[in-house]
């Protein structure tokens, strides 16, 4: 058996069930070996899309995904998606063929490239050790929650593996959760007992059912309000004391209540400038506590009074075991009434700015939230528009929202939703894009249609890069470099086999209702011509971080 086949089979036997990519000569045999061993291969039309699909699949499924790329340009094409995954600590294994011949046109220093964007690296170096080296790379991706590039030199892939080097298929050892110290838990409990207005902020490290349940119980005991970072949106969906998302997307009431907390506990959450609005959501007298299983994450973004190194679920359960009576905390009758009335953005009154030619994005988003089935998975691209779907489209739980924004690249939203859709096949996938990101990634419309995904793609189309328009426009700068003539994106989608509708007024959304009620035999693209007079409410906050 050749190294390429042995590695592919071993990785599949070790738990890789989905591999995304674009196949070239260098990764042909490896990819086919994984398929033969039972993995599903998802062919994208561009390696950048494949990388983001793999990232989103891993996030939404809770498993490690693989990305398979050709040597040299296959890897460089995928680099933006790999960077997003690395910055998000997504457990992703990148399988890249590698050209080592000095005169090869494909030769680049792939390890340096990966290190430059924050990914870890490994290499298959010998036929004898190939299988164990590949399994070690997968183990690191899983246990350290890292994006790992495994380089597979072409000449090594072609070697014969000695029979003695082919171990029986063995499952990967399970990552053991980090146990917090008793002293740290005791300090946390003292902080909770002293708090009158506690707020829990859950992040990426809390996105498990066990963590959610433990936090809900602990919050009930101490009267804490519950909120999340954007990537964990939906974790506390439907709870009477949920504030939905903290940070730039927070509703006015949610922001006021977070700002009024006397104790903020970040659970697996970085408490970075986005989640805390550059610190403005932390009151001057608030005590800040952070719980994370990575000690380097504690206090990385802001000063904290207490850092607890531990797994979120384990730490919350240890705090519960420490005892203590229930208290009202922040859960007063007045707070409960306010949350019931105006916790959601859609409950905040606004003046509709729609015209005969353009629909207000708030009106559009509220209508879509009502029309589309509640069991959905929403992927969001980056841009001026992104706050509308992120705040107005509800999601049923933490598996219902996939937010690839760590690198703040546009053009990832469509591929994000494809990956998330494959991880949650029983839900309606909804991709929310701007026109810039939609056209940048339009090639993956073919992938949606080819996979038979019943996806809704919503394009908030203002004919420009809205973030730049509204950032530079008020100062009188010329905007011809960031605005474009009207494009019929609905016609583009029809060319890929979509059903499509152009929406200028609420009445045009009747076609969306008909699609939802119908057989949904083809995906649907909504080319929504949205108003563009001013920037979205969160844009000013966002640009403070530039």
Image (cartoon, helix red, strand yellow):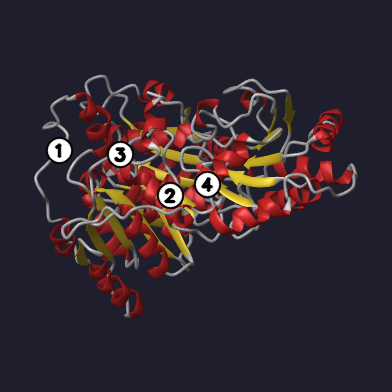
* Mark 4 or 1, nearer chain start: 4
Mark 4 → mark 2, Cα distance in angstroms: 25 Å
Disc 2: which residue: 390
Mark 4: secondary structure: loop
- Neighbor class of circle 4 (other Cα within 10 Å; few <14, some 14-19, many 20+) is many
- Neighbor class of circle 1 (other Cα within 10 Å; few <14, some 14-19, many 20+) is some
Q: Nearer the viewer, mark 4 or mark 2?
A: 2
Q: Nearer the viewer, mark 4 or mark 1?
A: 1
Mark 4 → mark 3, Cα distance in angstroms: 38 Å
**Pointer 2 with pointer 1, Cβ within 8 A:** no
* Mark 4 or 2, nearer chain start: 4
- Neighbor class of circle 3 (other Cα within 10 Å; few <14, some 14-19, many 20+) is some
Mark 1: secondary structure: loop
**Pointer 4 with pointer 2, Cβ within 8 A:** no
Q: Nearer the viewer, mark 3 or mark 2?
A: 3
In percent of width and height, residue 491 lies at 13, 61
Above or below residue 465? Residue 103 is above
In the drawing, what numbered circle is on residue 64?
4
Mark 1 → mark 3, Cα distance in angstroms: 14 Å
Disc 1: which residue: 483
**Outermost residue to the left:** 485
- Neighbor class of circle 2 (other Cα within 10 Å; few <14, some 14-19, many 20+) is many
In percent of width and height, residue 22 lies at 29, 47
Question: In the image, what residue occupies the spot 37% across and 43% down?
Answer: 51
Mark 3 → mark 2, Cα distance in angstroms: 15 Å
Disc 3: which residue: 535
Q: Is residue 460 left or right of residue 255?
A: left
Question: In the image, what residue occupies the spot 57% across and 32% down?
Answer: 281
Question: In the image, what residue occupies the spot 79% across and 45% down?
Answer: 222
In percent of width and height, residue 415 lies at 34, 50
């Amino acid at each position: 058996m050749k190294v390429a086949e042995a590695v592919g089979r071993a990785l599949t036997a070790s738990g890789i069930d989905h591999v995304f990519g674009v196949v070239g000569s260098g990764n042909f045999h490896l990819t086919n070996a994984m398929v033969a061993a039972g993995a599903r291969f998802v062919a994208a039309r561009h390696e950048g899309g494949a990388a983001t699909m793999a990232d989103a699949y891993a996030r939404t499924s809770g498993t490690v995904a693989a990305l398979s790329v050709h040597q040299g340009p296959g890897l460089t094409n995928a680099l933006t998606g790999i960077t997003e995954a690395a910055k998000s600590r997504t457990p992703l294994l990148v399988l890249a063929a590698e050209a080592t011949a000095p005169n090869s046109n494909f030769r680049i220093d792939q390890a340096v490239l990966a290190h430059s964007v924050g990914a870890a690296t490994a290499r298959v170096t010998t036929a004898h050790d190939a299988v164990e080296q590949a399994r070690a790379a997968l183990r690191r991706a899983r246990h350290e929650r890292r994006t790992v590039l495994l380089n597979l030199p072409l000449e090594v892939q072609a070697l014969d593996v000695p029979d003695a080097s082919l171990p029986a298929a063995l499952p990967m050892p399970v990552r053991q959760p980090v146990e917090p110290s008793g002293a740290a838990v005791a300090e946390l409990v003292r902080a909770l007992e002293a708090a009158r207005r506690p707020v829990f902020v859950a992040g990426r490290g809390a996105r498990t059912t066990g963590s959610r349940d433990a936090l809900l119980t602990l919050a009930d005991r101490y009267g804490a309000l519950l909120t999340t970072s954007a990537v964990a949106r939906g974790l506390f969906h439907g709870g009477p004391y949920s504030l939905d998302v903290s940070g730039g997307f927070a509703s006015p009431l949610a922001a006021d209540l977070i700002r009024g907390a006397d104790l903020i506990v970040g659970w697996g959450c970085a408490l970075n400038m986005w989640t805390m609005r550059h610190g403005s959501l932390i009151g001057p007298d608030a005590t800040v506590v952070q719980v994370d299983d990575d000690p380097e994450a504690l206090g990385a973004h802001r000063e904290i009074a207490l850092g607890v190194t531990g797994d979120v679920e384990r730490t919350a359960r240890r705090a519960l075991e420490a005892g203590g009576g229930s208290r009202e905390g922040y859960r007063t009758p007045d707070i409960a009434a306010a949350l019931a009335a105006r916790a959601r953005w859609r409950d905040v009154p606004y003046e509709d700015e729609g015209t005969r030619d353009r629909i207000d994005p708030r009106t559009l988003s509220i209508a879509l939230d009502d029309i589309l089935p509640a069991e959905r998975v929403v992927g969001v691209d980056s841009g001026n528009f992104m706050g509308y779907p992120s705040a107005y489209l509800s999601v049923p739980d933490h598996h219902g929202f996939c937010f690839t924004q760590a690198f703040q690249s546009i053009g990832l939203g469509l591929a994000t939703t494809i990956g998330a859709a494959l991880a949650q096949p029983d839900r309606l996938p909804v991709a929310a894009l701007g026109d810039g990101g939609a056209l940048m990634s339009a090639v993956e419309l073919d992938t949606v249609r080819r996979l038979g995904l019943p996806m809704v793609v919503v394009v908030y189309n203002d004919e420009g890069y809205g973030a730049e328009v509204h950032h530079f426009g008020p100062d009188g700068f010329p905007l011809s470099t960031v605005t474009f003539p009207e494009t019929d994106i609905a016609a583009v989608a029809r060319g890929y086999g979509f059903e499509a509708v152009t929406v200028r007024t609420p009445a045009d959304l009747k076609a969306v209702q008909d699609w939802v009620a119908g057989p949904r035999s083809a995906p649907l693209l909504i080319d929504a011509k949205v108003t563009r007079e001013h920037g979205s409410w969160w844009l000013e906050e966002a640009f403070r971080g530039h």
